[in-house]
Image (cartoon, rainbow, N blue to C red):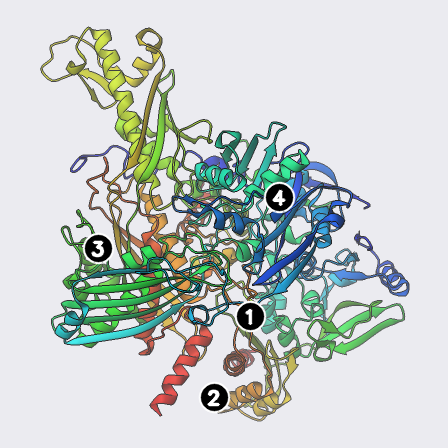
């Protein structure tokens, strides 16, 4: 099996790896690169646990070939917090108890960031439809929606 | 057993060469745009090794030209990109809402109209909407480019009128005439994330008196492939698109359907609901046309 | 008892101690461990729902380069018999045959072989090279089919248990159960109004987002370490030891973070396979299930068929009720018909009742626990019947329930008299709730239902270590599935009188802390919390002793107040109170490090009742149901972490609504599940639900130091009947089968219209 050499950027850092042509970005992130913050819930694009940003576009990394990452900017959950601390979305998820088991949380944090980067003041319906691809089985979504609403407020009016 | 390979040509002739070489050597190549169906199939029903030809790096498949008539929509443009384009949404709101219904936000970041069509699923959401607006496939091959109406492109469940050495470059859509409107509705059990149980796209053009002068109706998920329903269009043309005309079009859709019973719905249910969707989508298309 | 006490931290909602790692991707879940030299295990699964295995040839798979081990049924010990207790318990031989088929496959997806190879792709290639010859048998797929006397048998040696005499021939009915009081015939004779109904609910899955995963590493001495996502690593160790006939001391289980379980991760599937593959390959082996495997081959909960009859006098007083209930067990015995039977009439003071329940084998995956196992199905039937009764009597559904509600002293149908319970308080809160007193939206239907779960205690251990600066480390043995570390820290902080931020909790592996039963049965905050409180009390006793020694007082002259040792009232001592930090700093001089311990078998888990109601709209042209609003009211005894109690109520409501509206196992005639993925097994997505309003009722449980009742299970119970009753209200049609899917509703509307014509 001929492996492909891929050079990409993950969370602002240049990374290169070898992969098989049919390997997904999710598999390479987790198994080759050890970045296990991105989760696998279904591997068929139905749950959103593996959400990442590619060039700031929200995608499921299980539906992206690793080879496609060549020359792209990939952002994973590990790249959301900064030197100053947690991103407001992460902070609000904690404050609102918007996670129970927490396995869907990385995908939700990424998806919520993609939303608020585009639409700083989404209404509840917009948030619910935007996040419809991120399944959560623990919370019933209530506290997740509230956390995203509160994060939007914080981002609009930083303390 | 062969091996998987991945190529991402940057020129159309390169891509076509890869396809024709594979075709002539009896090796399998498969074009990938967003990959949202392809990667799922590679994990489940179709694990056979092949060369994946990624067409996202081609200029032509990424071209969106809304100024020309016909409009051109490149086959590799993700539906999220289309829906962020306010001009596109204003011009073809029904097609835009169909594109907006393909899976989640994540899926829309990758999935394309071209891929939705080439996947040739009976339930592809954008296909009835494309049929309704009279979209035509622009197909590139070594011998040049040919055109085929969308309703003739899909030939059956998972099969299409595309040779192994050809690829779908994009879609041409006639620029909507004044006082035209289109709409697409589908039915799913949840609010998001499901495959259509039934779908219906309607486009109408009105004259100054509000009488429908042209109409096209496409239905999906109720037959082995999405269908153009001329009888439904006939029920609309010449009417004021009142409830009776919409109901007649709905009945025509139900009659044109030949659905199956499966995990997503019963045949009887699909037949009824496609008529409901036609009525409702027709009313939305009418209201849009009145506003244009 | 903690009543009328002002708590400092209990009842607040601080950030959980494990939170930052979970929002940044650092937390390690089941599939997140990668070890040097690790290889990948995969499972070959049966393509048939029912077949005899004639032959398995693994030689071609073994010859593939990169394949290190192949196993099948013959690699396992014969499987000793015996019982395993606890929520994921059952018969050992059945458990062993469920993790790897021996002579027969009993469901589509049943494991028949497994391989370990250098890469997942080589492992999959090897699976394809394993030859299995089957003799295909007719599958048994429904309760009606399975209970017929001439039905094909899943197990030729299965004789129905609990009958007065052993039956003369085997059947698919594994066991029957009866529960009765009074005389139902007389009770029905006294009734002015009688309602009857027959309800069917399909199998449904817990739908946790994290698929099962583990890594096993076995050394040359045969000792294995297993990292896995589990609701109970001690019980996983016990089950794996029994299935593999290993010494418990040779197995170490390390729980990862767990991405949901809801009862489904109380049972082993991959773990013994990974241990065997690791032993054979002498390498660490990682095994993960695909989502499809999770649906096909782990335990959903039972599909049910229930007939119910309830009678009442004109004033609403219930006189009798009876129920006949069949539960699908899946491939092996063990359906939750017992808890289903014991819960069905629990909310009501019924002088006469009778329940007959059946545990029935079908060619589907062996069921596992799912949140309040058995109760959602049985109580759905009863709560629909009560709704019909209210309609016939012209009574408000809450008033009818209040009239018959169980209260302190009522004899529970399952035996004991209830201690203080919160059912009436929940009903009264519902009655005055603004969401209930406001009118229904036009065209919408409103449904009301009661939920209940017994809750359990069982065994827990806890240790409390005081660090040299007075901060606190709590060590316990229950995987944190929804914020329990925060609850443990809150109870420890409250008991010790220190700030919450000074307390951290960790979950020990099977070698570093004492035995604890599973995180399940809503027992963790109750039972493990009780152990943590007792361990803190142990610390306090030691602190008092050390302060007494420091001060030259007798131990009885020292008290513990707000985190300090102080002289008892009336003790004349001119000393400065000693904080936990003071005592910790001086520990070396007063007897060494402070370590508190407790282990217990908790008794007196208080039952938790709930009342739920909601407004639902039905599209009469498509049959689609929309949840417009939903309100959950539940007795938590005492909410330790308020937001996580609300979260349990909201999450359970969402699961119950999903089951009511869309979720179901759909099979074809060959017993192949048609919707083994999140695309077509339709759990609620964010846009399907409204905000879920909650009201926590606190009727403290006298058996717990802070009054805790388990809260996790009850929330899933009531939503099923809330949905059924709301659709009934909106349409005027009672639909007897879940889910309330659009095709089913549209067909019911049309049948009603046809009947009216």
> Where's the N terminus of chain C, which quadrant?
top left
Which numbered dot is residue C426?
A: 3
Residue B132 at least partly seen: yes
- What residue does disc 1 label? C668
Q: CA distance from mark 1 to mark 2?
A: 40 Å
Residue A158 picture location, percent across and down? 45, 40
Image quadrant of residue C53? bottom right
Which numbered dot is residue C75?
A: 4
> Where's the C terminus of chain C, which quadrant?
bottom left
Q: Chain of mark 2?
A: B
Q: Nearer the viewer, mark 1 or mark 3?
A: 1
Q: Chain of mark 4?
A: C
Q: Nearer the viewer, mark 1 or mark 2?
A: 1
Label 2: state its secondary structure.
helix
Label 4: state its secondary structure.
helix
Would residue C469 be found to the left or right of residue B196 on screen? left
Would residue C132 be found to the left or right of residue B52 on screen? left
Q: CA distance from mark 4 to mark 3?
A: 54 Å
Image quadrant of residue C577? top left
Q: Are marks 1 and 4 in contact (CB under 8 Å)?
A: no
Which numbered dot is residue C452?
A: none
Q: Nearer the viewer, mark 1 or mark 4?
A: 4
Q: Are marks 1 and 2 in contact (CB under 8 Å)?
A: no
Residue B112 picture location, percent across and down? 67, 63
Q: CA distance from mark 1 to mark 4?
A: 33 Å
Would residue C192 be found to the left or right of residue C490 on screen? left
Residue drawn at x 61%, y 88% is B233
Q: Marks 1 and 4: same chain?
A: yes
Of callouts 4 and 3, which one flags the residue occurring earlier in the amino acid sequence? 4
Residue C160 picture location, percent across and down? 39, 60
């Amino acid at each position: 099996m001929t492996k492909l050499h891929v050079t990409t950027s993950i969370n602002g850092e240049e990374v290169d790896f070898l992969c098989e042509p049919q390997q997904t970005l999710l598999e390479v992130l987790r198994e080759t690169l050890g970045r296990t913050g991105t989760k696998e819930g279904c591997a068929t694009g139905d749950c959103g646990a593996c959400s990442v940003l590619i060039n700031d576009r929200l995608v499921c990394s299980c539906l992206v070939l690793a080879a496609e990452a060549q020359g792209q900017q990939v952002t994973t959950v590990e790249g959301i917090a900064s030197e100053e601390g947690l991103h407001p979305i992460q902070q609000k998820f904690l404050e609102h108890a918007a996670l129970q088991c927490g396995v869907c949380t990385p995908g939700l944090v990424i998806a919520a960031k993609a939303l608020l980067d585009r639409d700083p003041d989404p209404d509840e319906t917009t948030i619910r439809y935007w996040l419809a691809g991120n399944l959560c089985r623990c919370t019933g979504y209530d506290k997740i929606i509230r956390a995203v609403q509160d994060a939007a407020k914080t981002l609009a009016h930083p303390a | 057993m062969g091996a998987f390979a991945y190529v991402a040509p940057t020129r159309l002739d390169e891509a076509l060469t890869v396809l024709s070489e594979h075709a002539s050597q009896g090796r399998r190549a498969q074009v990938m745009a967003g990959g949202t169906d392809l990667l799922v199939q590679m994990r489940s029903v179709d694990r056979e090794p092949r060369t994946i030809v990624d067409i996202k790096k081609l200029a032509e498949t990424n071209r969106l030209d809304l100024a020309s008539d016909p409009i051109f929509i490149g086959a590799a443009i993700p539906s999220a990109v289309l829906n962020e384009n306010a001009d596109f949404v204003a011009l073809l709101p029904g097609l835009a809402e169909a594109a907006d219904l393909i899976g989640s936000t994540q899926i829309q970041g990758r999935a394309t109209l071209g891929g939705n069509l080439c996947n040739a699923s009976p339930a592809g959401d954008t296909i009835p909407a494309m049929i309704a607006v009279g979209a035509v496939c622009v197909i590139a091959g070594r011998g040049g480019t040919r055109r085929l109406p969308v309703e003739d492109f899909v030939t059956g469940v998972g099969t299409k009128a595309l040779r192994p050495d050809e690829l779908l470059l994009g879609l041409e859509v006639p620029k909507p005439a004044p006082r035209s409107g289109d709409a697409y509705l589908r039915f799913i059990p949840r609010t998001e994330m499901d495959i259509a149980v039934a779908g219906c796209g309607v486009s109408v053009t009105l004259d100054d008196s509000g009488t429908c002068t042209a109409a096209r109706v496409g239905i999906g998920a109720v037959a082995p492939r999405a269908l153009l329903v001329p009888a439904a269009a006939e029920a609309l043309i010449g009417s004021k698109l009142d409830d009776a005309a919409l109901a007649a079009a709905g009945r025509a859709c139900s009659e044109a359907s030949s659905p199956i019973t499966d995990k997503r719905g019963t045949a009887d249910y699909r037949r009824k609901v496609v008529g409901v969707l036609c009525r409702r989508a027709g009313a939305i298309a009418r209201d849009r046309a009145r506003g244009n | 008892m903690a009543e009328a006490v002002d708590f400092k931290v209990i009842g607040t909602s601080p950030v959980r101690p494990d939170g930052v790692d979970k929002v940044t991707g650092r937390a390690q879940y089941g599939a997140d461990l990668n070890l040097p030299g690790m290889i990948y295990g995969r499972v070959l699964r049966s393509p048939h729902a029912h077949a005899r295995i004639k032959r398995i040839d693994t030689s071609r798979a073994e010859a593939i380069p990169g394949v290190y081990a192949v196993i099948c049924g013959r690699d396992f010990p014969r499987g000793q018999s015996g019982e395993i207790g606890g929520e994921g318990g059952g018969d050992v031989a059945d458990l062993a045959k469920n993790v790897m088929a021996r002579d027969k496959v009993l469901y589509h997806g049943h494991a028949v072989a497994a391989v370990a190879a250098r890469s997942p792709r080589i492992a999959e290639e090897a699976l394809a090279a394993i030859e299995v010859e089957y003799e295909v048998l007719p599958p048994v797929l429904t309760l009606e089919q399975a209970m017929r006397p001439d039905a094909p048998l899943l197990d030729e040696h299965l004789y129905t248990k609990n009958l007065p005499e052993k039956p003369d021939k085997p059947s698919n009915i594994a066991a029957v159960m009866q529960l009765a009081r009074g005389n139902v015939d007389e009770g029905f004779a006294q009734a002015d109004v009688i309602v009857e109904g027959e309800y069917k609910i399909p199998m449904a899955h817990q739908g946790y987002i994290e698929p099962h995963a583990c890594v096993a590493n076995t050394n040359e001495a045969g000792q294995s370490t297993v990292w896995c996502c589990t609701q109970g690593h001690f019980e996983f160790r016990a089950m794996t030891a029994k299935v593999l006939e290993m010494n418990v001391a040779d197995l170490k289980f390390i729980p990862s973070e767990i991405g949901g379980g809801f009862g489904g991760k109380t049972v082993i599937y991959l773990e013994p396979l990974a241990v065997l593959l690791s032993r054979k390959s002498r390498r660490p082996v990682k095994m993960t299930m695909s989502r499809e495997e999770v649906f096909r081959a782990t335990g959903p909960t039972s599909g049910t068929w229930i007939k119910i009859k309830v009678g009442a006098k004109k004033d609403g007083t219930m006189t009798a009720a009876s129920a006949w209930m069949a539960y699908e067990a899946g491939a092996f015995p063990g359906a939750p018909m017992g808890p289903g039977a014991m819960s069905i009439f629990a909310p009501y003071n019924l002088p006469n009742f009778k329940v007959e329940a059946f545990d029935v084998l079908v060619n589907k995956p062996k069921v596992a626990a799912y949140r309040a196992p058995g109760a959602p199905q049985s109580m759905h039937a009863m709560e629909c019947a009560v709704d019909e009764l209210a309609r016939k009597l012209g009574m408000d559904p809450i008033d009818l329930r209040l009239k018959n509600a169980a209260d302190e002293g009522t004899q529970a149908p399952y035996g004991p008299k209830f201690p203080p319970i919160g059912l009436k308080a929940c009903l009264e809160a519902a009655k005055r709730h603004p969401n209930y007193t406001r009118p229904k939206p036009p065209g919408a239907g409103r449904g009301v239902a009661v939920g209940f779960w017994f809750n359990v205690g069982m065994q827990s251990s806890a240790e409390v270590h005081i660090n040299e600066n007075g901060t606190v480390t709590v060590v316990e043995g229950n995987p944190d599935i929804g914020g329990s570390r925060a609850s443990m820290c809150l109870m420890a902080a409250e008991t010790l009188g220190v700030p919450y931020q000074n307390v951290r909790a960790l979950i020990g592996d099977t070698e570093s802390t004492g035995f604890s039963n599973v995180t399940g049965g809503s027992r963790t905050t109750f039972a493990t919390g009780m152990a943590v409180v007792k361990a803190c009390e142990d610390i306090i006793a030691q602190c008092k002793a050390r302060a007494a020694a420091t001060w030259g007082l007798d131990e009885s002259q020292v008290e513990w107040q707000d985190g300090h040792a102080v002289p008892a009232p009336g003790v004349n001592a001119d000393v400065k109170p000693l904080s936990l930090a003071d005592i910790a700093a001086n520990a070396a001089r007063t007897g060494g490090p402070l370590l508190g311990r407790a282990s217990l078998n908790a008794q007196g888990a208080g039952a938790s009742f709930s009342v739920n109601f909601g407004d639902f709209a039905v599209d009469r042209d498509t049959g689609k149901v929309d949840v417009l609003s939903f309100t959950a009211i539940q007795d938590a005894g005492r909410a330790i972490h308020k937001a996580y109690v609300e979260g349990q109520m909201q999450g359970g409501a969402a699961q119950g609504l999903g089951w009511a509206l869309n979720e179901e196992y759909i099979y074809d005639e060959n017993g192949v599940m048609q919707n083994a993925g999140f695309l077509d097994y339709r759990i609620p997505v964010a846009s399907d639900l409204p905000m879920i309003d909650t009201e926590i009722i606190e009727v403290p449980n006298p058996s717990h130091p802070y009054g805790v009742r388990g809260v996790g299970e009850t929330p899933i119970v009531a939503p099923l009947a809330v949905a059924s009753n709301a659709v009934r209200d909106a349409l005027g049609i009672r639909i007897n089968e879940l889910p309330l899917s659009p095709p089913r509703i549209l067909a019911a509307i049309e049948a009603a219209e046809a009947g009216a014509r």
